[in-house]
């Protein structure tokens, strides 16, 4: 069975600085999708960034980028120029290529200080 | 706007009294998920559908049931809620399209059991 692990329960960053959130996963599949989701307090979960495992190039969405290391089964999220609005729970998630099942890591709470 | 809508946002039910949570979507997605999320924890997948094909997680208690009468609607029935079932329940939708596999979430229903 696939598992997703986030080893940092909490992280903090100063506004305008850069922070990296870690995620590792375990799977025997060769093709899959990885996601980072953001869940602000009392608000709905939204997608931050997506990576297809067959793509070697790391995904980037504005201030958000990933470092995808397939051999190491690592998928970290880098947030550049952090903003107060980035404060939220961040979840790493995995979906196999031939499955609909979407499983989540335990989450990292990110605090952003002015 | 196309979206995933969960009703009600807040639900209070009595211990042992059946309760139904609802989810609707205008995205016309084939896949629908129900997750249980307890405070500061990862969303836990209860079950998911591909169209009417139902997939139950092995560790989902029998107390939890689901119905999907059509593409747009999905219901979560808790037959005899216990205090331990108090949580946020998240509904999400997705597709199997290769470039569009991310899940879209509703705002959740917070269930309180008294």
Image (cartoon, grey):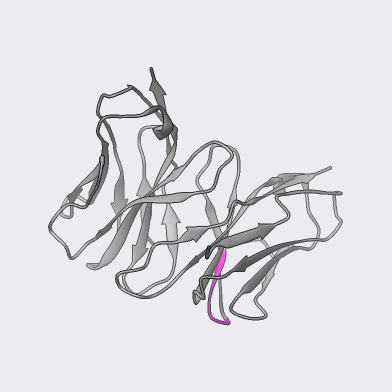
Residue found at x 49% / y 49%? A45
Quadrant housing the C terminus of chain B? top right
Quadrant position of residue A35: bottom left
Q: Does residue A94 sit above or below B84 in this rendering?
A: below
Which segment did they paint magenta?
Answer: B47-52
Q: In the rendered image, is residue B59 in sight?
A: no
- Location of residue A82 with respect to A32 vertically, above or below: above
From where the camera sits, is residue B4 visible? yes
Q: Residue furthest left?
A: A56
Residue ranking furthest to the top: A114
**In percent of the image, x 58 and y 79: which residue is there?**
B71
Question: Is B9 placed above or below A96 here?
Answer: above
Dominant secondary-structure state across the stretch colored magenta: strand
Specify whether A85 is left or right of B92: left
Residue at position x 36%, y 40% in the image: A6
B32 sits to left or right of A3: right
Residue A29 placement, left or right of B67: left
- On the image, the x and y values in percent for residue B86 come to 71, 45
The picture quadrant where one finds residue A22 is top left
Residue displayed at 39% across by 34% down: A86
Q: In this view, does A67 lie above or below A103?
A: above
Q: Which residue lies furthest to the front in this view?
A: B1
Q: Where is residue A44 in the image (x, y as percent from the top left)?
A: 54, 48
Towards the viewer: B34 or A14: A14
- The foreground one among B87 and B16 is B87
Residue A100 in the magenta stretch? The answer is no
In x, y percent, where is residue A3?
38, 54
Is B100 situated left or right of A69 in this image? Answer: right
Query: B31 or A42, which is in the foreground?
Result: A42
Residue B104 rendering spot, x and y as whole percentages: 48, 60
């Amino acid at each position: 069975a696939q598992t997703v692990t986030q080893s940092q329960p909490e992280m903090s960053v100063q506004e305008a600085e850069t922070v990296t959130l870690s995620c590792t996963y375990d799977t025997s599949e060769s093709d899959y999708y990885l996601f980072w989701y953001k869940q602000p307090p009392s608000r709905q979960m939204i997608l931050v960034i997506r990576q297809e495992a067959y793509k070697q190039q790391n995904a980037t969405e504005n201030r958000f980028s990933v470092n995808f290391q397939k051999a190491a089964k690592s998928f970290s999220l880098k947030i550049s120029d952090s903003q107060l609005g980035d404060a939220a729970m961040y979840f790493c998630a995995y979906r196999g290529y031939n499955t609909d099942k979407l499983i989540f890591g335990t989450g990292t709470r990110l605090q952003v200080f002015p | 706007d196309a979206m995933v809508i969960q009703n009600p946002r807040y639900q209070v039910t009595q211990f042992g009294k059946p309760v139904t949570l609802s989810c609707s979507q205008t995205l016309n997605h084939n896949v629908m998920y129900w997750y249980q999320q307890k405070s500061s924890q990862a969303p836990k997948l209860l079950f998911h559908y591909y169209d009417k094909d139902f997939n139950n997680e092995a560790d989902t208690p029998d107390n939890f049931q689901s119905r999907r009468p059509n593409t747009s609607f999905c219901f979560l029935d808790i037959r005899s809620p216990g205090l331990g079932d108090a949580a946020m329940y998240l509904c999400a939708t997705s597709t199997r399209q290769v470039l569009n596999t991310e899940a879209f979430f509703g705002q959740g229903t917070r269930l309180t059991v008294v």
